[in-house]
Image: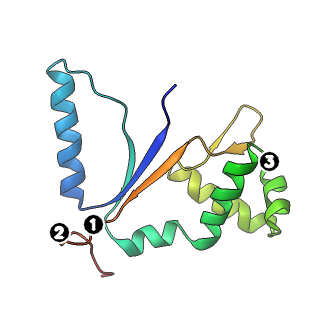
Amino acid sequence: MSKKILHIEIQSADKSLQGFEDTLLQIESGKKVDPYFSIGFESLPQFAAVFTPKRWELIGVLKKSGAMSIYQLAKLLKRHYRNVHKDVTALMKWMIIEKDEDSHVFIPWDEIDMRLPLNNGELKEAA
């Protein structure tokens, strides 16, 4: 079984759409396309608003500990349930966290690959 990798990229919407178009053309021409799971952000501030230090800590603890209830996760993190629930909900919207059939939350990814361009002028400042 291959690793499930989530690619997080900071790039323009145009570049994201171009990648989608390229993949679609490959599929339409009958070529085999390997699964590629990604989410994109147009700017570093947008990324940082989603991936706060507390949320990175939550991701690490949840991946290490395995599926559990949000209540159990809050106790493990020594954080208030409401704040952990808010963070889990936000990360679920971005497909970082999923729920199983028992409503336990878990990290479905083996790896998160973060790409941050530095030299090509795509890294945007906050508007």
> For this rendering, which residue is in front, 13 or 68?
68
Q: Position of residue 29 (x, y in %)?
A: 14, 21
Q: Position of residue 27 (x, y in %)?
A: 21, 24
Whole-Å distance between the Cαs marked 2 and 3? 42 Å
The three-letter code of the residue at mark 2 reads Asn
Q: Is residue 3 left or right of residue 62?
A: left
Residue at 18 percent across and 39 percent down: it is 21
Residue at 57 percent across and 56 percent down: it is 91
Q: Position of residue 78 (x, y in %)?
A: 83, 68
Q: Is label 3 in a helix, a strand or a loop?
A: loop
Taking 49 as reference, is 76 above or below it?
above
Q: Position of residue 15 (x, y in %)?
A: 19, 54
Whole-Å distance between the Cαs marked 3 and 1? 36 Å
Q: Quadrant of the C terminus?
A: bottom left
Q: Is label 2 in a helix, a strand or a loop?
A: loop
The mark lying in front, picked from 3 and 1, is 1
The mark lying in front, picked from 2 and 3, is 2
Q: Is residue 110 left or right of residue 61?
A: left
Q: To which quarter of the image does residue 34 belong? A: top left
Which residue is disc 1 drawn over? 117
Which residue is disc 2 drawn over? 120
How does the figure colour the protein chain or chains?
rainbow
Residue at 77 percent across and 53 percent down: it is 70
Which residue is disc 3 drawn over? 69
